[in-house]
Amino acid sequence: TIANEEDFDVLNSMESNIMFAEEDGSLGDEGFEWITVPLAISDATNPDFWKPYMNTLSKYSDVDEDCGFHIHISKSVFPEDKRTELIGKLIIFYQYVIKRTELNIHVNGRRYGYSECNPRSEIADALFNKTNKLVGPLEKSDIEEMVSQIIDDSTCERYCNINITNSKTIEFRLPAGSIDSNTISNYCRYYYLMVHYIIDTPWEKCMSKDEFVNYLLSNSEDNQNFKDLINR
């Protein structure tokens, strides 16, 4: 968020057991970021959980087009014996199926965030072409080596829409900055469900926007706001 020095001092003195502030030089002299402790998914996807904090932030700060919202999800959600394959599968799904769709742009509040130009993308291209655009079941022997290279730290950069260089988390960096409780809870639900879609859906069905949308809606019966967002 963006705040002047006086308002920043007020915010920085705010007591919270879930978040703390750090100055963010990428946003200029008046920029800072709020970092939360690890949250239960029931809290992160609940707008009522965020409202007290966002109401306070909105009194003393604002967001602009340079602000972003970053979501970390633990890599431990992926079964250990399939973690490499599933993270590679997530990258390919994001890059080829979702990244440039109106759905993804609308949910994230912007079209572009970070560059995807690194060796990881070239490896994903090769994998995508080799597997005949991922139609039909895939043999593990056909994909294991290239998927391993996709998530090799030596070929990855931090400043990508999906940052996988952290040892314990996957970081989604595309969402636009926000201090709106509904928007934040929708971000968290969208990426939480994206990760579980990758885990739950076989390769031969996974690379489909329609399948993904159906998955989002079927797992959001309790949240009409999110369903309305997806259906727009």
Image (tube, helix red, strand yellow):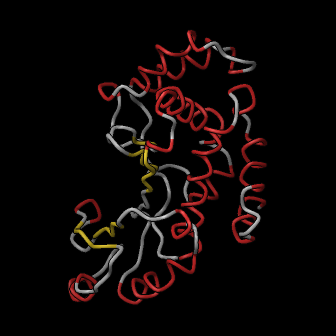
The answer to whether 194 appears left or right of 76 in the picture is right
Residue 152 percent location from the top left of the image: 36, 25
| Figure check: 130 above or below 66 | above
| Figure check: 118 above or below 230 | above
Residue 64 percent location from the top left of the image: 42, 70
Out of 29 and 16, give the one closest to the viewer: 16
Residue 100 percent location from the top left of the image: 62, 43
Quarter of the image with the N terminus in it: bottom left
| Figure check: 114 above or below 31 | above
- Going 39% across and 62% down the picture, which residue do you hit? 38
Out of 175 and 171, give the one closest to the viewer: 171
- Going 21% across and 85% down the picture, which residue do you hit? 9
- Going 39% across and 46% down the picture, which residue do you hit? 169
Q: Quadrant of residue 220?
A: bottom right
Residue 50 percent location from the top left of the image: 49, 77
The total number of labels drawn is 0
| Figure check: 30 above or below 9 | above
Out of 101 and 151, give the one closest to the viewer: 151
The answer to whether 220 appears left or right of 180 in the picture is right
- Going 40% across and 78% down the picture, which residue do you hit? 62
Q: Quadrant of residue 63?
A: bottom left
Quarter of the image with the C terminus in it: bottom right
